[in-house]
Image (cartoon, helix red, strand yellow):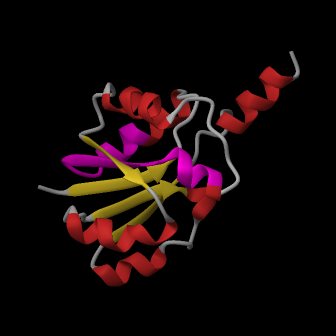
Amino acid sequence: MKRVITYGTFDLLHYGHINLLKRAKALGDYLIVALSTDEFNALKGKKSYFSYDKRKALLEAIRYVDLVIPEENWEQKVNDIHEYHVDTFVIGNDWEGKFDFLKKEGCEVIYLPRTPEISTTQIKTSLGKN
């Protein structure tokens, strides 16, 4: 079985997120989503609209997602790859090159293009103007 992992906040879930998850799942048999916890978001200077538990429940309801785990720090990726026997690491291409070091762990690294016309930041900005 080929295992794929991706990471993110997945706040204000939208069709760009679904596109990413669908394309990530198509790269393997089992998709793991490492979801940023509220505490980790605070360390990154981010605040999600929905709590970790609500974002997790939304992700678990999506047919492409097989497992949701907490993302609690930047350093856990290497451990996750080994603990969950991950074959492929997938993330948006705005992170291009940043995770190439994971190849040394025997993991394929793929940067997928974002859905250009949608983002959570764009949604939050647009809602703030109304």
Q: Does 103 sit left or right of 119 as displayed?
A: left
**Residue 124: image x %, image y %?**
74, 30
Which of the 4 image quadrants contains residue 63?
A: top left
From where the camera sits, is residue 92 visible?
A: yes
Quarter in which the N terminus is drawn:
bottom left
Check the image and report above or below for 12 versus 75.
above
Q: Does 67 sit left or right of 12 as displayed?
A: left
User: Residue placed at 31% from the left, 71% from the top?
Assistant: 79
User: Residue placed at 30% from the left, 37% from the top?
Assistant: 65
**Residue 12: image x %, image y %?**
58, 28
Which of the 4 image quadrants contains residue 90?
A: bottom left
**Residue 39: image x %, image y %?**
55, 50
Check the image and report above or below for 35 versus 126.
below
Q: Which residues are magenta?
A: 21-42
Q: Residue furthest bottom?
A: 104
Quarter in which the C terminus is drawn:
top right
